[in-house]
Image (tube, rainbow, N blue to C red):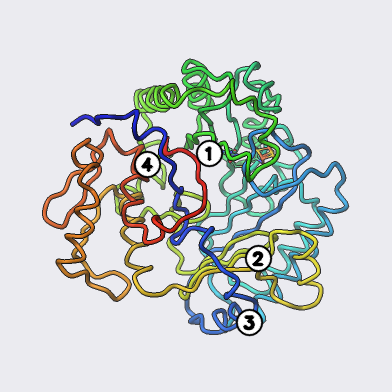
Amino acid sequence: MTVHNLGRYATITVPRYTSYPTAPHFNTGVNGQTYQRWLAETPPDETASLYFHVPYCRSICAYCGCFTKASLKDGPILAYGKTMAREIDLVADHLPGKLRVTHMHWGGGTPSLMPREGFQTIFEAIERRFDLSNVDEHAIELDPRVVNKALAADLKAYGVTRVSLGVQDLNAKVQQAIGRIQPLEVVEGAVSALRDAGLDAVNMDVMYGLPRQTLEDVVRSVTACAALGADRIALFGYAHVPWMKKNQKLIAEDELPSAGARLEQVRAAHRALEHMGYVSVGFDHFAKPDDPMARAMRGGTLRRNFQGYTTDTAASLIGFGASSIGKLRQGYVQTAPDVGAWIRCVEAGELPVSRGYEMQGEDRLRGSIIEDLLTGFHADLSIARGGITPDQTWINEHLIRLDDLVEDGLCQVVGAHVTIPEDARFLARLVAARFDGFAEQSKARHSVAV
Ligand SMILES: C[S@@+](CC[C@H](N)C(=O)[O-])C[C@H]1O[C@@H](n2cnc3c(N)ncnc32)[C@H](O)[C@@H]1O
Ligand code: SF4
């Protein structure tokens, strides 16, 4: 089966669905008091995954869409770390006991910029307040430009098990256009320092759709990552949203590849990665066939959360740090995005929640169908989800919405089963979006689907 009218779909904008509802639909009705109640209602035997957001980098890359800021000094980062340790105590004070942690993830920004003393203070707090005896994965996002032997040894000592390196593109002219000079030798040096320290589960991020980037550049970059032995490669399409991210105004729009060129880039990278033995996982990840993420996909346990695709199956996700998002049974909470406001709130002994979303009505049903479509590329609309079993009218109404996508080969429908065929998987978000109850009323502007 082949996809038709691709050009039409390449320019449509859709969310990445790292949550449902997506963050633009969070509201201020969820606040510190709501969070306090939700934490207290958490069953004591629940498993949790912990996310730590460190919004600092040495300099800001022009393409960056993450919530971060530049700091050449360690002082503000250390102070931030000490506040994070206080936040851990504040949150844990409302929990029914020491929850068992299965996953830990450090994101940013560049979390490895946290000085040793900051990490130590944070780890003391986590160890005091959570049960860390059975952590399956402890991951951290790294900028290869600031990885050295001493950092690698520290990460190993902290119990880190997986590292994720931002490679983006290895061509010098692209690196100039995105304000991030990082020759292949820098990435090679980082990988060997990490492996020498015993950190051998290595992920790499590659981007396509960058200014001045050609199809050959993208293929060369993923090939270099494979040659360096990356266990997982994430292939992210550059999301150009300068109305939200002021730093992206530095990107010359006339140097960006066209929608058609982006499509060619992503398809060529897919082919190259599959040819090199990687398995396609979800719509933007690739993994070695024996990697836990590829196994999770085969076993039907792959999940999607704020970090994108994950093998994490914990019931709750607790976020720490400014702008971090957590998910409890009742819904989502987001901490204050402004570092100053987040610090003031924590120092005053209050949970620093600025907004969130309480799940209601059909939210769990829709969220579960969207997650199934994006992780397993299949959803049975007739089964019970979130306490709701859709009736035939609901199913028919939703199947009708897929008519044009079925016609163009983006999905197939048999009875109440929706399946996304292999060559349309990179467009899976377009199918998922047809189950989004907020899609019609959404005023949020997203990036393109490809
Ligand atoms: C938070 S960054 C952390 C990595 C680390 N700070 C670094 O730069 O190497 C995670 C990844 O998000 C991706 N990313 C950042 N901005 C993006 C954008 N505007 N569109 C798509 N992907 C983006 C990049 O691939 C980056 O490696
Ligand atoms: S891509 Fe990484 S290093 Fe660059 S600004 Fe974003 S978070 Fe910082």
Is label 2 in a helix, a strand or a loop? strand
Q: Which residue is mark 2?
A: 335
- The part of the image, by quadrant, that contains residue 366 is bottom left
The disc at residue 281 is 4
Element at label 3: helix
Amino acid type at image mark 3: Gln
Q: Tell me which corner region of the image, top left, top right, bottom left or bottom right, holds residue 196.
A: top right
Position of residue 180 relative to residue 388, above or below, is: above
The percent coordinates of residue 321 (x first, y second) are: 69, 61
The alpha-carbon separation of the residues under discs 1 and 4 comes to 13 Å
Secondary structure beneath label 1: strand
Where's ligand 2: which quadrant? top right
Q: Residues within 10 Å of mark 1 (few under 14, many from 20)?
A: many
Residue type highlighted by circle 4: Val
Residue at the image position 37 percent from the left and 41 percent from the top: 281
**How many residues crowd around disc 2 within 10 Å: few (fewer than 14), some, or many (20 or more)?**
many
Question: Which circle, 2 or 4, is nearer the viewer?
Answer: 2
Q: Earlier in the sequence, mark 3 or mark 4?
A: 3
Q: Is residue 27 visible?
A: yes
Mark 3 — residue? 33
Is ligand 1 closer than 8 angstroms to the Cβ of mark 3? Answer: no
Quadrant where the C terminus is found in the figure: top left
